[in-house]
Image: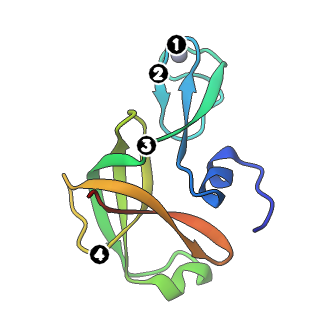
Amino acid sequence: MTDSLHPFTDGLARGQLRYQQCEDCGAPQTLSRLACTACGSQRLAWREASGRGTVLAASVVSRAPSDAFRPLVPYTLVLVELAEGPRVVGHALPGTGIGDRVQAGTFAHERRNLLRFAPAA
Ligand SMILES: [Zn+2]
């Protein structure tokens, strides 16, 4: 596994899905922030998510954005709202659709772990 400098990809390398939460007001953050989107605090901590969530949007990618992703096409990408509140984009099993309840997992690709959602048990 290559060295990672980012807590999110570092978490995926360990099979964990991480998100930021404000230590002052508790607001979960979508994407990686320097300051809380709710109160502006810079006291943001990384937490491990349960991995449970609901699909808000889904699309099938048939044209790879780079050579690295060409072997994977066609693949499904989903926007998921996690149980903890933040939203995250990841791969999903074919046929995953809006409103589906899903569970996060990872798969190895090009020596990295990528996020992939499967139907929740
Ligand atoms: Zn805050």
The answer to which of 37 and 112 lies nearer the viewer is 112
- As helix, strand or loop, the secondary structure at mark 2 comes to loop
Q: CA distance from mark 4 to mark 1?
A: 38 Å
Q: Is mark 2 within 8 Å of ligand 1?
A: yes
Residue under numbered circle 4 = 94
Q: Position of residue 33 (x, y in %)?
A: 60, 33
Residue under numbered circle 1 = 39
The answer to which of 57 and 92 lies nearer the viewer is 92
Q: CA distance from mark 3 to mark 2?
A: 16 Å
Quarter of the image holding residue 104? bottom left
As drawn, is 117 to the left or to the right of 13? left
As drawn, is 29 to the left or to the right of 57? right
Q: Are marks 1 and 2 in contact (CB under 8 Å)?
A: yes
Quarter of the image holding residue 82? top left
The dot on residue 81 is none
Which colour scheme appears in the figure?
rainbow
CA neighbours of label 4 inside 10 A, class few (<14), some (14 to 19), many (20+): few
Q: Nearer the viewer, mark 1 or mark 3?
A: 3
Q: Is mark 1 within 8 Å of ligand 1?
A: yes
Q: Position of residue 114 (x, y in %)?
A: 55, 65
Q: Is mark 4 within 8 Å of ligand 1?
A: no
User: Looking at the image, which residue is at 48% across and 41% down?
Assistant: 49
Residue under numbered circle 3 = 50
Q: CA distance from mark 4 to mark 3?
A: 22 Å
- Amino acid carrying label 2: it is Ala
Q: Earlier in the sequence, mark 3 or mark 2?
A: 2
Residue under numbered circle 2 = 27
CA neighbours of label 2 inside 10 A, class few (<14), some (14 to 19), many (20+): some
Quarter of the image holding residue 59? bottom left
Residue at the farthest right position: 3
Q: Position of residue 75 (x, y in %)?
A: 38, 77
Q: CA distance from mark 2 to mark 4?
A: 32 Å
